[in-house]
Image (spheres, rainbow, N blue to C red):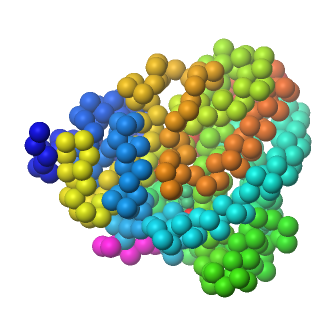
Amino acid sequence: MTISTSNIPTSSIDPFSEEYILEPYAFHEELRQLGPVSYLSDLGAFVVTQYEYVKEVLNQPLVFCSGAGVGISNFKKDPPWRVPSLVLETDPPDHTRNRAIISKALSPIALRALKTQFEAEANLLIDRLLEKRNFDAVKDLAEAFPLKVFGDAIGITPHEREKAIIYGNMVFNGMGPKNELLKQAMSRADEINPWIMSVCQRDNLSKSGLGIQIYDAVDSGILTEMEATTLVRSFLSAGIDTTAHAISNAIYSFVSFPEQWLKLKANPQLSKSAFEETLRFESPFQTFFRTTTSNAKLGNYVIPENEKVMLSLGSANRDPLQWENPDIFDISRITTGQLGFGTGIHGCVGQMLARAEVEALLQVMAKKVTSIRFTGEPKRLLHNTLRGFESLPIEFI
Ligand code: OVV
């Protein structure tokens, strides 16, 4: 069989068009039909949408690297807008060292203690929202919960914490092309950039949170003070908006599939698989990019060196070759292998913490909330990377 760079199918689909962002699934299907990889002529990048090949790319981190950025921009050609992440936008051996430092802070013992706090806060929040009855599930629930519990877990100051949402928006919209969404997200960069670096400094972190533990690596001579600050920043870049949109997407999915809500209420233990199914069905982190470090074989094709490759996790998670009835939200399905957290050496390092948060919340909701309904039109978020909602007006009874 011939292996060639020239016969890769081309598509004029623009994954950053408003149409695609709002409803990507038919476009995913069209791209999956084209084969393991296609070239997006408008974007000037390759795209991988089939489950098998998204996974294959993620499992070859040296051929498909992260050090040149995981957005559309190639750091070798365009300077990054922020100090690059020491874990997301880096490759072994630096990545290995830095990830191990974060992993250590997220130990199973630390998570066990946090779980109790998450449950207590979930109870408080859901009680308050049941009393309020009508509210915006995005601001008042999906954002409020991780801002409180994750912010406390990391140990950042409660003062102006909502700015972390704005920062997350910069990070994730910043992975897209220089479109209106990116410009809009970056409009407060001059204020938000120094703010985020300041909250991540040693002296501004609580003595009992996970953030300050990163500075142990400075004390043992492994990291510089600035590197530790940048690593703490990763917690806040990756851990708030993503979880918030996962919560919004779970609520939206339960209202859209009411029989699944009844299933969860009948068995709150299903909150674990409900969260996994939400990540599969409406993956908050829809896409990221890799950069080829050499000619890179994929199926019977070869992607040339130093090219950007877009990976569609959202598409892989609905690939009919992998999933039965992929467009149905079913919390009792076996979700093993869903790629919402990525996989391989860059697979989400905070996934156990995210699970502890959302499972606690869904369990409390299943026990305390009888019914959820929309009281207005849900407004989808226009965003370069994240799938979620701008607002979800709902009623809790
Ligand atoms: C997984 C993720 C997303 C966004 C930012 C970062 C990580 C980071 O390390 O900065």
Q: Position of residue 257 (x, y in %)?
A: 61, 19
Q: Position of residue 215 (x, y in %)?
A: 72, 77
Q: Position of residue 242 (x, y in %)?
A: 60, 49
Vertical order, 40 against 75 (above or below): above
Residue at (42%, 50%) from the top-left corner? 58
Residue at (22%, 47%) from the top-left corner? 39
In the picture provided, is 283 more to the left or to the right than 44? Answer: right
Q: Position of residue 268 (x, y in %)?
A: 78, 25
State which image quarter holds ligand 1: bottom right
Query: Observer-nearest residue: 136 or 245?
Result: 245
Using the rendered image of the protein, determine whether residue 361 is visible from the camera's viewpoint: yes
Vertical order, 321 against 230 (above or below): above
In the picture provided, is 164 more to the left or to the right than 126? Answer: left
Using the rendered image of the protein, determine whether residue 136 is visible from the camera's viewpoint: no
Q: Main secondary structure of the magenta part?
A: loop
In the rendered image, which quarter contains the N terminus? top left
Vertical order, 191 against 342 (above or below): below
Image: magenta residue range: 76-81
Q: Is residue 345 magenta?
A: no
Query: Observer-nearest residue: 204 or 48?
Result: 48
Residue at (60%, 79%) from the top-left corner? 227
Residue at (30%, 46%) from the top-left corner? 47
Vertical order, 199 against 282 (above or below): below
In the rendered image, which quarter contains the C terminus? top right
Which image quadrant is residue 197 in? bottom right
Which image quadrant is residue 330 in? top right
Q: How many marks?
A: 0
